[in-house]
Amino acid sequence: MSILTTDNISKQYPGTQALDSVSVSFASGKVNALLGKNGSGKSTLSKIISGAERASSGTFSLDGEVMSFTSPAEAAERGIAMVYQEMSLVAGLTVAENIFLGRLPLKRKLVDWKELWSHAKAVIDRMGVSIDPRTPVYRLAMWQQQVVEICKALSFNPKVLILDEPTSALAQNEVQRLFEAVRLLKEQDIIIIYITHKLQELPQIADNVTVLRDGMLSGTADMDSIDRRGIINLMFGEVEIKDRPSDLEASDEVVLEVRGLSRKGWYDDVNFSLKKGEVLGIAGMLGSGRTELLRGIFGADPVDGGTVIVEGKEYQSRDPSKMNRAGVGLTPEDRRREGLIMKHSVMDNLCYASMDKTRNGWLEDKPKRRLFARHQVDALDIKVPGINTLSSTLSGGNQQKVVVGNWLNNTPRIILYDEPSRGIDVNAKQQIFEIMWEQAREGIATVFVSTELEELLEVCHRILIMRHGKIEDEITDPASTSIEELYTICMGGQSDD
C-alpha cells in the first residue's frame, strides 16, 4: 500500500491564506474524495501536490520520501499526475496520439505507429474499457474522452492520480461507465484523489472523504460513517437545503410556445408550452438534444423547421439579438466560453445584454452601467471586491451569478438555463435555485436543463423528458417522483420498471 501525506502545508497569496497548516493522508486501494466549497483550498492543495504550485510552508511525502516539484512535468516524472476538469484533447488526432502527445515513439526519425498503437492499447486496457487507439477523438462519447484524459496521465505510470471533477460534463449513464474504470484503477495500487462537487456521487465511488473549509482541514471520514448532511456540515457549517416553495405557483398564462421545432440530427418536431412564473425542467441523457433545443429556441443555432411564439408573437426566424429584444435570455452550458468574456470586468459582463439601456447613442452611459452592475451585485449577492474586478478571478458560483445578472439587467420575461449548476458547490447551487424561485415569484418563466436529475426534482414545477431529440414523456408532479423513477424514464423505461 502506498501513502501520500501532507505535513502542515500552507499557501499564502497576497492578501489571501489559501491553505493553513493542512495535514492529511491519502492511501492507495481507495478512492479518496477531496471536497470543499469554491475557495476552500482543495484546488490549491492539489496543485501543490501535482507541481503546479509550491507551498509557502510545510511538506508532503510519498511513501516516506519528501517531495518538492518546480513543474507538473517534474511531478509526473516522479509519479504524480493530475487530470484537470477542462479536457485538453486534440479532437482531430487519434486516441493514441493524444495519450502520447509530445512523446510519440520514433523509428528512424519517423513515428513508429505499430509501437504507438501497442503502447496506447496497453494503457487503455488498464482502464478496462474497449476503445480503439486509432479512433479520432471527435468520434468518442464524452465519457470515453474523459477516459482518454485519464489514460494520458496513466501513460506516466503514476503512483498518485488526481481527478478534478471528472464527471462534470457527463450524463448519468456515462458516469457509471467512468466509475467502473476508476474502480479498476484503485485495485492497481494507485493513490486516487477524487475532487467533486457532486455529493450524490460519493456513496457510489468514494471510500472516504477529506473536507477542506476556508483553507483548513475541516474533517475526514469513511463513507460508511457519514451521510450527505454530515458532509455538507463539514463543508459549510449549517446549510439549509431547500425544496421548491409550496406556495410557488405558475399562472395559467402561456408566455412561450414551441411548435414543431426541428434540426436534423439533433431534435425533431418538438412541441411544448411554458407558463408565466413556471420553472420547467428538461431531463435527458447526454446527446438527447436538450442543449441544442435551447440554442434553437434562442436563435443561437439554425433550425430546419418550426416556430417559437413569445407572448403571442410568432418568431419563425430568430437570432440572439431578436430574442433578447423579445425578452428571452439564455445562460449557456459553458459559462466561461459562451456566457462571459473572462478578461472583461464584472461590470462589463453584467451589462452586455442591456447595452441598449446603458448607452447614449453610440456612447456608453458609464454612470448607468455602474448603477446596473451594482444593482445585480447586491440583488444576487455576488461576492466580488468591486465591479471592475476581472470576471476570470471569481469562483464558479459567482461567475454563474454574473451570467444570470447580465440577463436580469434586461428585464426578461423568459430565461433558458443550460446546466447552471455545473462545477459549482452546494451552497452556490442553492443560491442559484433561490434566484430562479424569486424570479418565478416576479412572473419570470424558466426552462431549466440539468444532467443532475435530483436538481430537477427539487426545483421544477414540471419536467419534460427528451430522448433521441424528441419530447417523449412528462413528469407533472416532481415532488412525488423518485430519482430512480426519473432516471428510468430518461433511459427509456417505465417508471414502475
Image (cartoon, helix red, strand yellow):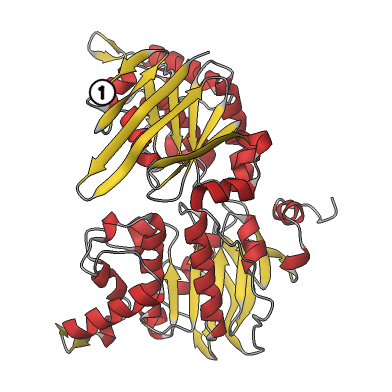
- Which of the pair 359/314 is nearer the observer? 359
Say left or right for 468 vs 303.
right
In the rendered image, which quarter is residue 390 located in?
Answer: bottom left
Residue 328 showing in the rendered view? yes
Residue 102 showing in the rendered view? no
Q: Secondary structure at mark 1?
A: loop
| Tally of numbered discs | 1
353 in relation to 138, above or below: below
Name the residue at 62% across, 52% down: 285
Q: Which residue is mark 1?
A: 69
- Which of the pair 74/287 is nearer the observer? 74
Say left or right for 13 vs 300.
left
Q: Residues within 10 Å of mark 1 (few under 14, many from 20)?
A: some
In the rendered image, which quarter is residue 257 located in?
Answer: bottom right
Residue 137 image position (x, y, % from top left): 43, 36
Q: Residue furthest right?
A: 496
165 in relation to 338, above or below: above
Name the residue at 18% across, 84% down: 367
Q: Residue furthest left?
A: 363
In the rendered image, which quarter is residue 480 located in?
Answer: bottom right
415 in relation to 432, above or below: below
Residue 223 image position (x, y, % from top left): 63, 35
